[in-house]
Amino acid sequence: MAGARGDIMAGRAYVELWVKNNRFLRGLRDARQRLNQFGADMQAFGRQLVTISALMIIPIAFATKTFADFDDQMRQVKAVTNASAEEFAKMTAHAKMLGATTSFTAIEVAALKAELGRAGFDPSQIDAMTASVLNLARATGTDATLASGIMAASIRQFGLGASDAQRVADSLTVTANKSFNTVEMLGEALSYAGPVANDFNMSLEDT
């Protein structure tokens, strides 16, 4: 009897040990699965962070590039106009203001200012003419820098001044919009006709 009882107890112990061992193994498997899932979740989270970081960097990089381009363009303005520190500060603020309040960017405004500077206008004249150039460009769908060059040439050809900028803009706009000519075509024609017409005392409008 004692031997049988011992065998039974030994069998129970073996069964309990086997059950506990199975539970332990299942626990290990569960723990490993959870660790694997945690690792996968962390990898996915890491990829999301990288994507978010990249998306955050894009507008910063774009803004930095835009500022650099504007700064480079304004440096050209300063170089061609020989503007003083005070004049340059005013021109820079003016370009930023127009870039923020019109359909043109500050870079485009700065580029047209540089073009007017190359035509020999001083900083105060350039600031006074800029709005008229933008009006001409917007009304005729012309590139702002191209419009500034044509306006500057027209003013010089007819012996006009910076104060006549809006008059020139209006004349070119009306003529271009009432004909099959573009402002660029008018500018090309005036480069030949303008000096001759001025010699005969003909106005820009008559020409």
Image: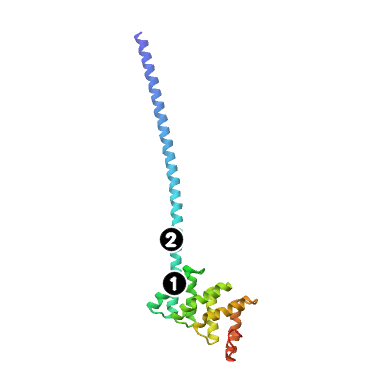
Q: Relative to residue 107, is residue 179 drawn left or right?
A: right
The answer to whether the residues at label 1 and label 2 have Cβ atoms under 8 Å apart is: no
Residue with the most extreme top position: 1
Mark 1 nearby-residue class (10 Å; few <14, some 14–19, many ≥20): some
Camera-side residue of 117 and 91: 91
Seen at 43% across and 50% down, the residue is 49
Q: Position of residue 20 (x, y in %)?
A: 38, 25
Which of the 4 image quadrants contains residue 124? Answer: bottom left
Seen at 38% across and 79% down, the residue is 84
* As drawn, 72 above or below 167: above
Which of the 4 image quadrants contains residue 33? Answer: top left
**Which label belongs to residue 72?**
1
Seen at 43% across and 67% down, the residue is 67
- The quarter in which the N terminus is drawn is top left
Camera-side residue of 101 and 114: 101
Q: Position of residue 24 (x, y in %)?
A: 39, 28
Q: Amino acid at mark 2?
A: Ile
Which of the 4 image quadrants contains residue 173? Answer: bottom right
**Which label belongs to residue 95?**
none
Camera-side residue of 191 and 201: 201
* As drawn, 26 above or below 106: above
Instruction: Give how far apart the Cα atoms at labels 1 and 2 are.
Output: 18 Å
Q: Which residue is mark 2?
A: 60
Q: Position of residue 151 (x, y in %)?
A: 54, 80
Residue with the most extreme left position: 2
Q: How many marks?
A: 2
Q: Position of residue 54 (x, y in %)?
A: 45, 55
